Image (spheres, helix red, strand yellow):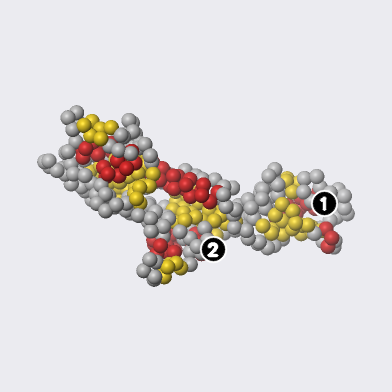
Amino acid sequence: MKRVFFAGLAASCAVALIGCASGGTHKTTTFSSATLSNAETSSLTLTNPLSPGLLLPGDNSFTLGPGDRVEIEIIGNPTSRALTGVGPDGRLYYNLLPGLDVWGLTLAQTREALESGLGKYLNEPHVTVTLREVGSKSVWLLGRLSKPGIYPITGPMTLLEALTLAGGSARSQTTSGREASVQELADLRHSFVMRQGEFLPVDFHRLLREGDMSQNIYLQPDDFVYVPSALDQEVFVLGAVRFPRALPYTERMTLLGAIAGANGAVKIDWLSMTYSGIAPDAYLSHVAIVRGSLAQPQVTVVDANAIMKGRALDVPIEAGDIIYIPNAPFSTVKRYFNLIVSTFISTVAANAGLQAGGSQSVGVSIPVGH
């Protein structure tokens, strides 16, 4: 099924970093994983371990669904061989049977159901059922891959196997003429796996650059894997802004400059210390900047009000930063980061999914057996 999920993330935290100010002494506070500070700039680093269960293959057998195609034959009767598909209603139409509901059945269970149904018309029929095409279960593999697309999945498949299937080992030419692998051209910091609306904190850098198999999770049907390009120098501005989007990164970009870019314009009335051009429900005292790997990001909470009112220096922005402006204050970093990652991943996944939605899934013929 072609679905795009919303994501969330649970995180445990460790302390780090600070910021600077002008016009007096700038407050910098190191704070715990539980509570946000009212200081003008506060930062920490989050560590998001993978659940050990994600590294185990599923024990569920393949079950049929709409879009699957099977080859059926009554043993001893070669003329009975037919290739038929499971319809949108989950039914299989074969021979004299009016329609057999096979949605959710394994191949063995489907064979038994066919033999039982045909037994009303034939004397003890024996049937073979072979899976030929998979259309009901797939994984999304999109982004900076040689062969991005929607791939069928019939059994245990690891993330590394899936990336290889989508051409993760292919090579491209850089602007200097040097060949570069997809791993080099991919933004591994912002690569992610999404499952049933949840973000799985896989560290793509550790997996692909360091060969750390502790990050090589098993995929499940409908998993969404996205590998963005490292060539796109962008800054993501999300939340309570007029135009949530990715902005082209420019040298010496600052927080206020990025916010202005996502709002069309920001005008400050220096007499009344008010500003226009920003969404009316924007809560500028808790603007977050997320930097680095999604698996182990650095989260900085900035009081943009203090910057606009001249109590603090503007904050430099780097390519790849995620800037989030909430419409309400948050009391815990954990909850705040969950919201930021959820918004970022669902936005990226929706855009990538819409672009890929018009293309057909990769056609693969898979003789799985009886």
**Residue 39 in sight in this render:** no
Residue 152 position, x and y percent, is 60, 56
**Residue type for callout 2:** Leu
Q: Residue at x 38, y 47 (%)?
A: 246
Is 265 in front, or is 296?
265
| Label disc, if present, on residue 165 of the rendered structure | 2
Left or right: residue 316 versus residue 97 is left
Residue most extreme to the bottom? 178
10 Å neighbourhood of mark 1: few (<14), some, or many (≥20)? some
| Label disc, if present, on residue 95 of the rendered structure | 1
* The quarter of the displayed image where residue 172 is located: bottom left
Q: Residue at x 18, y 46 (%)?
A: 20
Cα distance between the residues tagged 2 and 1: 37 Å
Residue most extreme to the top? 272
Residue most extreme to the left? 24
- What element does badge 2 sit on? helix
**Residue 299 in sight in this render:** yes
Left or right: residue 222 versus residue 258 is right
Is 34 in front, or is 145?
145
Is 202 in front, or is 254?
254
**Residue type for callout 1:** Asn
The quadrant the C terminus occupies is bottom right
Residue 73 position, x and y percent, is 79, 59
Marked residue nearer the N-terminal end (2 or 1): 1
Residue 297 position, x and y percent, is 33, 52
Residue 39 position, x and y percent, is 21, 40
- What element does badge 1 sit on? loop
Q: Residue at x 69, y 59 (%)?
A: 132
10 Å neighbourhood of mark 2: few (<14), some, or many (≥20)? some
Q: Residue at x 68, y 50 (%)?
A: 105
